[in-house]
Image (cartoon, coloured by chain):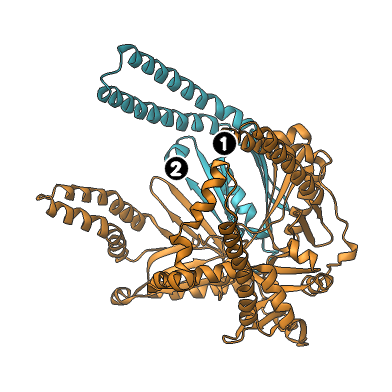
Amino acid sequence: MAALTPLDPRVIPLDRAIGGILAAVVSAGSFVALVLTLLVADAWPWWVGILLFAAWFAGSIVFALWLQIWPAIEYRHASYGVDEVGLEIRRGVWWRHVIHVPRTRVQHTDVSQGPLERHWGLGTLVVFTAGTDHARVELRGLAHEVAVTLRDQLLPGRESDAV
Amino acid sequence: MPSEVRLHPSSLVFGFADELRRFALPALVAFVSGRAGGGSEDLWLLVLLVPSLGIAVIRYLTLRLRYDDDQLVIRSGLIFRNERHVPYSRVQNVDAIQNLVHRLFDVAEVRIDTGVGGGSEARLKVLPLAAVDDMRARVAQGRGAAAPTRAEPAGAAEATPAVRTLLRLGPRDLLRHGFIENQGVWIIGAAFGAAWELGLLNRLDNVVLGRELFERASMREVVGPVVSGRVPPLEPLAVLAGVVIGFLILVRLLSMAWSLVRLYDYRLTHTGTELVASFGLFTRVTATVPIHRVQLLTISESLLHRLTGHAAVDIDTAGGVAERAGTGRESLAPILPAAEVPALVGALLPGFEAAALDWQPVHPRAFRRAVKVPVALGLAAGAATAPVIGWGAIAAAIVLAGWGAIVAHRYVAHLAWCAPEGLVLFRSGWLARKTTIAPIAKIQVVRRRESPFDRRHGTASVRVDTAGASEFGHRVDIPYLPAAIAVRLEGTLASGAAATVFRW
């Protein structure tokens, strides 16, 4: 069994930033929807509006807080390892998955980097196999250099032969 | 440092053309509706084109192709950057597509296929023709260096051309197959559809079905009293039952006739490297599957199969380069005596010995897990009938929940798996049973999963992913394994797969 390494801790601020953006978009969207609803339904008593705004406010706060807390929890349950067998990925807080991609089944690989990932120096390794459900296995939250190193380690070694 | 290749400048033209084509229909609709409305305000929607045109420009400007010693490297993206490494040894095919306009610019669209499930190969739009030839040469060269003994297995296999007949089905077998599979519904459905298309239906139900059956509203005479709790009149009830039974018999007969015609003189032969199935009365089909393409083998035993001592065997195959379209599930033996299954499977998967299989049950507490959902559903369904049948709903709920518990119990009791040398097998089903066998050399990915419920009971599930698996087919996906055994099985399968080389 491969020695497991945790993800790069910088994935926590990255996911918090993504969560912040998501929370802002969802809050703004639901705020607009709420205002429009209240404008249309002007027959409602005044306190319904106050109540709805309070609910919106509370919901937004809880959602935003949750998205700030969750990345650290998720981080604690994610790890990966590469050994002579191949790549092993563990993730999931409630539903825990352990995914093995044998080295000889890696068809090709991607290392990708989005703008936020670049800001934190992170990258995503994507391994492609000939499988059906797991034709694309993604490992995000790696330092970019680590993703590149892993990619090179997973290359079909000079020892193996063709498909 | 090897030099980098860029896309041909005409890529911009093709990129724009693609985007325009995608927008052509909505734009046309917008334009026409704008006309109809007396204005053309909707044309501002064309602004939506700008970002996608921008993407086409960025793609052209940023895409770089590099040939390393043993792999092809494709970099792309400005904001979202991606670097794809494609080892030459994994390249199945380099396709160049040239339409008329491509020819005008002396370029081609290139697709590099590595046989990834779902077809996410590299796509290059567009490269100069010279670069395509160069790429082919480099890939061939790189592949040659990586795999000097590529042609050997095929050559060795050709030395044993002994053709063996694995299975022959006579008319009796085919009639039995038709009876068991009962595909008559599809035929009737197809005939119904065709008749409807041709407008024959109105005339048909006058003549054949007896229009008066519906005119006299027999249905209402029967259904009405049942709903309102009275005893329905006997005569229309008998007519209705007769029609239903007659229909069921007709469907079975049709199915039997259909299987006789379609699978007439079914022969399955084994040529050493390939399986050849030939069948058909009017259209004679000869299907060839190289044995090494078999990814998964499934033995189905429905209730009728088991009552008559028979079974059916299907295989999942993954097409290589030549047969991309030929992926999916195929019937290997539409029907055969259950006693002959081990011999057939053994012919395909060397090392398979039915007698030596050490079937393992799942976790002893699996039933406790499996029983909850069906019992809850049964109780809910029973409760839902309360408005209609009143207190009877309690009885209905008990019966439904009891039935759910029985099904769960039998289901869990029939779950079994085993992992002999080089294979992994999984069996499930109570009335209709399925056994799936995956050669370890065909395993792509191994996944172990623990749900919160699994953790409470100390269980886990292990699933095996293979190429060309059918979406809803039976797979090797073993639930309720004891956690420690799941970990061991996962390790065995992953390291077993890693030790073998995957061949298409």
Is B206 on the left-hand or right-hand side of B29?
A: right
Q: Residue at x 29, y 74 (%)?
A: B101
- What label sits on residue B388 in the rendered view? 1
Q: Nearer the viewer, residue B462 or B259?
A: B259
Single out the residue that lies furthest toward the top.
Answer: A47
Which chain is assigned orange?
Answer: B
Crowding at mark 2 (Cα within 10 Å: few <14, some 14-19, many 20+): some
Is B400 on the left-hand or right-hand side of B72?
A: right
- SS category of the residue bearing label 1: helix
Single out the residue that lies furthest toward the right.
Answer: B356
Q: Determine the colour of chain A.
A: cyan
Q: Amino acid at mark 1?
A: Val
Q: Nearer the viewer, residue B273 or B224?
A: B224
Q: Residue at x 72, y 74 (%)?
A: B176
Figure check: A76 above or below B10 = above
Name which quarter of the figure residue A7 lies in.
top right
Measured in 3D between alpha carbons, the distance from the residue under mark 1 to the one under mark 2, in whole angstroms, is: 58 Å
Figure check: B209 above or below B229 = below
Q: Chain of mark 1?
A: B
> For the image shown, how many numbered marks are present on the structure?
2
Q: Residue at x 46, y 51 (%)?
A: B82
Residue B452: percent from left, percent from top? 69, 33
Is B38 on the left-hand or right-hand side of B135?
A: left
- Give a yes or no on whether discs 1 and 2 share a subunit: no
Residue wearing tag 2? A114
User: Can you see residue B193?
Assistant: yes
Q: Amino acid at mark 2?
A: Gly
